[in-house]
Every structure is written in C-alpha cells, then in structure tokens.
C-alpha cells in the first residue's frame, strides 16, 4: 500500500512520529511530501501534493497533519475521488474507514495526543469498508452528488452574466424532460476532455504531418479517435476533424462533385436534412439537387421512385440519410440504385450513428462510398462531425477537410470524440442503444393511444413524428405548450405538410436523452400521457402547471450525467 504524508509546521512533529510508526508496519510504502522543517509553511501546499496523487491513483491513501486538521481536510476534499476525514480518536479512525471509505486522514496536532497515534493508525489500517452495504449506498450518493455539481468557479469570479446563464441551463437540463431527437447528455468524461487544455493547441494538418510544432500529445489524441472510430464502425478510413455534420457533408460533396453536378437526396420536407440540397443551403446553391421523398400512403421512402429518378437524372452522387425519418433505411437497395446509375453513394447517418454502432440499425459503412455523421445525438459525444470512407477515397477526403474547407482542427473536441468512441465500444452502450429503441417504440405506441397520430404508424429507431393535424393544433403551439410543462420537443414539418415550416403540423420526439438519464418503458408511458393531455388542450395554463409539477417530481429521480 502506498501512503503519502503531508504537514505544515504545526503538524511537523506529529508527522515525524507517524513516519516512525509506519516504518514498523509491513506492506506500507511511505512518501513524505513535506514540509521538511518546523519553519512556518502553508498547509494547502502539502495537502495538494498528497490529495492530487490520491485522486490520480498513484497513492492509495494519504495522511495530512496541521494544527487542527481542518484546513488539510478542506483542501483535500476539493479533489475528485478524495474522501478526507478529520480524525480525533481511535473510534473516529475506525468509523471513517468502515462507514465512509475515507482514503485521506486529516489529523490535528493540537487536539490529538501523540501517545494515541499507534492505536489510531492501527484502527485506520485494520478497518475495512464493506462494498454493497448500507454505508456503500451512502458513499455512492456522496459521489453522485459530486458528479452532478456543475460549478464553473473561474467563470463565477470573472463573468457573472455568463455564469448565471450556464447555471440556468444546468437547472433546465436537470428539470426538463428532453425529447429533442438530436440532443443528448454527454458524459462528464467527454465534457472534461472538451474543457481541457487541448483547446489551446493549434494543429493544422494531420498526425505526424502538422504545420506546427509541439503536437505530440494532440497527435496521440487524434490517432486514438481515428482508430477507435474505425473499430467502432468497421471503417477503412476515418477523418475526425470536421467541426460539424454540415462540414463533413461539404467535404464529401467537394471531393466528388463540381458546381452544377447532379445529386439525388431526400427532401427536407419529407424528413431529409438542410445540407442535403435545400435551396437556402450551400448544398442547394452549388449543386443541381433532385429530391426524393416518401410514399404518401405508407409514409416510408419510396425506393421505386428513387430508382426512377436515378435512371432519369443520372446523378453523380446519391445521398441517403435523414433528420426526421423513423424507419429502417434500406442501404442495400440504395447501393443497388447508385450502382445502376453510376453514382457514388453517401450516407449521412448523423441521427442513427449510435444505433448503428451498437447493432440496432443496419450499418451503411460496408456499402457506402462515404458515411458522414455527427458525434453527438445517439453517440452521446461532443458536438462535431466525422467522415468514414473506403481507403481509396482517404487522401481526397482528408485533402478536402484540410486545407479544403477548414483550417486548424478543434483538438479539445477531437479529445471528446476519442472519449465518446471508447464509451461506445463498451458493452453498456449496446444496452443503452437497445433501450433507446425500446423507449421510442413504447412512446410512439402510447401516444397513439391518446389520439396522437404517428407518421408511418410507428418507429424503428430513436425518433418519431407526431401529426397534430387531426387535433387542429400546430406544431409551434404544441411545442410551446409542452415547454411550459417542462417537456422539450421541437416543431417539425410532416410529409406533405400544408402548413408553413415556421408553424408546421407536427412535432418531432426522440428518446436518446431520457434514456441516458435511465428512464425506461414505464416512464415513456407516463410521458406519453402528459403529452396527449397537453396537445389536446394546449391553451390551458393550469394544465401545463399541473403537469410541470409532475414532471419535476419525475426528473428529480433521474439525474443527468
């Protein structure tokens, strides 16, 4: 066992006595981190040295001594994974270990007699914490509390306005039921990577081929992200530098298309995406985009129509993928259509990437020439983009990302991507993705029971479109009313919508975020009932407040990461 010792001048004599006692114990390796004399010294300097190493895992335990033990304990407990306990007696030493799993003992030289030290040390080292006990449950609650605290202290000191906005968003995310299909909760590990010093480093180029020096550590992070992405999706090549899904799409377009070339893509009005050729977007301005959509009867992709359009227009690129389509996409059929017309096949799997990674949606990676995605949504990573492609296209894709459309990559975001991919490679992520789909299917089925029509009659993935036309309610009004009840959705056009896109006839709902919080089918049933009541009476403020109170009672039980 590795033990770190630290004291200020007030605890120096006691520390020397402890060193002598520990030297007689077997199996203990002791390191003294100061102070090394009785001259005046500041206790935080030595508490930090010991607590930091306990937090990092290079020390198993620490013993800190000052005049009272108070300052040492306060300092040590600033560090994650440190559980410092002030100890004044043999009984406190034993209970601190047995009940609290303390890993740092803070002693007060002025309040602890030297003659009691041998018994205190014996009690501390001989006591054992019992995993799975009631005490373990309580310690876990302490740990969970620490993880939930989001307190940007530097911002609090420097910019109270931004601090207030951040804390307001923290409260909103904790309290509200988040059903926006493109949103999720990134883990604390991902957020720590994004907030790291990697943000300070400029790194134009690629690992081993940078235009700047000092890139050895950002190179390591980017290589990890690339290799993990390839492993996660079975890809031949991965570029993790795109700042967003939009820039990932742009890089692919510029790799294979010239201005004016024809592209076949799903219409935004039928569930596609803005960057798949909408006239207000760069993709619709640079290229000749032929849209395809869904069958008006089934509200599923009309593959026969796609085949006819491909034969007629001979596109250079067939783009698949959607932002509001709830059914399995037949990538094999689209590959065959692309081949028959001599087109490249690109799949934007931004919404379903997490489901693909976990095996709950067929993968486009073996079939498509290019696959783009975001790294948030169902992947639960940082907001960013990525391109997967065949090895034959690797050089051109990399060239189009840099120097083609971007300069320096966001290395702190790439660090977050690397962490996200590792998380998605764990067995627990597969269970998460399974529950996302199960929750979505339950939510859709329960909504239909309330009289809300679900486009295409259900869902195979993480999202659904609710058609509010039969209720004579607009998507805009429904989303606003639900927001007042602490349920967050977004208004969304439905296929063949007669209302303006700013107003819409539908709302889009998704289950990635609520599933991350640990909610399951039972909660989906309750949420569907709340939504059904709100959308049938969206003007009732009393109803909104009553449901809001019920929502807050539910979300209190399911903490965000």
Image (spheres, rainbow, N blue to C red):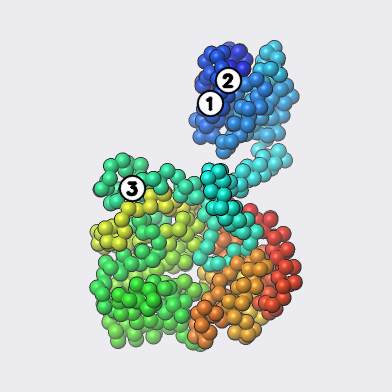
Does label 3 or label 2 sit earlier along the sequence? 2
Counting the numbered discs, the total is: 3
Horizontal and vertical percent for residue 150?
A: 58, 48
Q: Are marks 3 and 2 in contact (CB under 8 Å)?
A: no
Q: Does residue 334 show up?
A: no
| Residue of label 3 | 202
Q: Is residue 77 left or right of residue 391?
A: right
Q: CA distance from mark 1 to mark 3?
A: 33 Å
Q: Is residue 394 left or right of residue 470?
A: left
Within 10 Å of disc 3 (Cα), the crowding (few <14, some 14-19, many 20+) is some
Which structural element holds mark 1? helix
Q: Is residue 63 left or right of residue 395?
A: right
Which corner quadrant of the image does residue 504 belong to? Answer: bottom right
Q: Are marks 2 and 1 in contact (CB under 8 Å)?
A: yes
Within 10 Å of disc 1 (Cα), the crowding (few <14, some 14-19, many 20+) is some
Q: Nearer the viewer, residue 119 or 366?
A: 119
Does label 2 or label 1 sit earlier along the sequence? 2
Which corner quadrant of the image does residue 335 belong to? Answer: bottom left
Residue 45: assigned label: 1
Which structural element holds mark 3? loop
Does label 1 or label 3 sit earlier along the sequence? 1
What residue is drawn where x is 62% and y is 82%? 473
What residue is drawn where x is 53% and y is 60%? 184
């Amino acid at each position: 066992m590795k033990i770190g010792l630290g004291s200020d001048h007030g605890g120096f004599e006691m520390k020397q006595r402890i060193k002598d006692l520990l030297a007689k114990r077997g199996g203990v390796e002791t390191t003294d981190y100061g102070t090394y004399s009785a001259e005046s010294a500041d206790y935080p300097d030595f508490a930090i040295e010991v607590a930091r190493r306990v937090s990092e895992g290079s020390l198993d335990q620490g013993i800190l001594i000052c005049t009272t033990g108070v300052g040492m304990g306060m300092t040590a407990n600033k560090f994650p994974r440190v559980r410092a306990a002030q100890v004044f007696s043999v009984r406190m030493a034993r209970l601190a270990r047995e009940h609290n799993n303390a890993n740092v003992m803070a002693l007060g030289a002025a309040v602890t007699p030297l003659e009691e030290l041998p018994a205190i040390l014996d009690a501390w080292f001989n006591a054992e914490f019992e995993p799975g006990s009631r005490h373990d449950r309580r310690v876990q609650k302490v740990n969970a509390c620490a993880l939930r605290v989001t307190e940007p202290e530097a911002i609090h000191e420097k910019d109270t306005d931004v601090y207030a906005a951040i804390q307001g968003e923290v409260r909103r995310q904790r309290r509200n039921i988040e059903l926006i299909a493109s949103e999720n909760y990134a883990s604390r590990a991902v957020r720590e990577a994004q907030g790291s010093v990697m943000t300070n480093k400029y790194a134009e180029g690629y690992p081993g081929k940078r235009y700047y020096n000092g890139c050895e550590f950002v190179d390591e992070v980017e290589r990890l992200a690339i290799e993990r992405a390839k492993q996660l999706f079975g890809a031949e090549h991965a570029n993790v530098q795109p700042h967003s899904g939009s820039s990932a799409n742009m890089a692919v377009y510029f790799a294979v298309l010239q201005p004016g070339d024809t592209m076949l893509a799903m219409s935004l009005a039928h569930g596609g995406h803005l960057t798949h050729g909408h006239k207000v977007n760069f993709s619709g301005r640079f290229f000749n985009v032929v849209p395809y959509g869904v069958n008006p009867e089934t509200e599923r992709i009309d593959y026969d129509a796609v085949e006819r359009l491909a034969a007629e227009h001979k596109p250079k690129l067939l783009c698949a993928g959607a932002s509001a389509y709830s059914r399995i996409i037949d990538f094999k059929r689209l590959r065959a259509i692309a081949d028959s017309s001599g087109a490249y096949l690109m799949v934007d799997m931004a919404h379903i990437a997490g489901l693909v990674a976990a095996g709950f949606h067929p993968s486009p990676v073996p079939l498509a020439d290019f696959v783009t995605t975001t790294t948030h949504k169902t992947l639960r990573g940082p907001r960013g983009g990525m391109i997967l492609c065949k090895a034959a296209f690797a050089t051109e894709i990399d060239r189009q990302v840099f120097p083609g459309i971007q300069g320096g990559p966001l290395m702190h975001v790439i660090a977050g991507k690397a962490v996200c991919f590792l998380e998605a490679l764990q067995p627990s992520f597969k269970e998460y993705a399974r529950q996302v789909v199960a929750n979505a299917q339950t939510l859709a089925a329960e909504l239909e029971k309330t009289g809300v029509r679900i486009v295409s009659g259900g869902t195979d993935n993480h999202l659904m479109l609710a058609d509010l036309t039969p209720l004579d309610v607009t998507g805009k009004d429904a989303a606003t009313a639900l927001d007042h009840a602490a349920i967050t959705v977004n208004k969304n056009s439905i296929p063949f919508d007669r209302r303006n896109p700013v107003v819409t006839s539908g709302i889009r709902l998704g289950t990635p975020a609520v599933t991350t919080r640990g909610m399951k089918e039972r909660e989906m049933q309750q949420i569907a009932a709340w939504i059904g009541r709100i959308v049938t009476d969206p003007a009732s403020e009393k109803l909104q407040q009553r449901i809001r109170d019920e929502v807050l009672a539910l979300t209190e039980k399911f903490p965000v990461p």
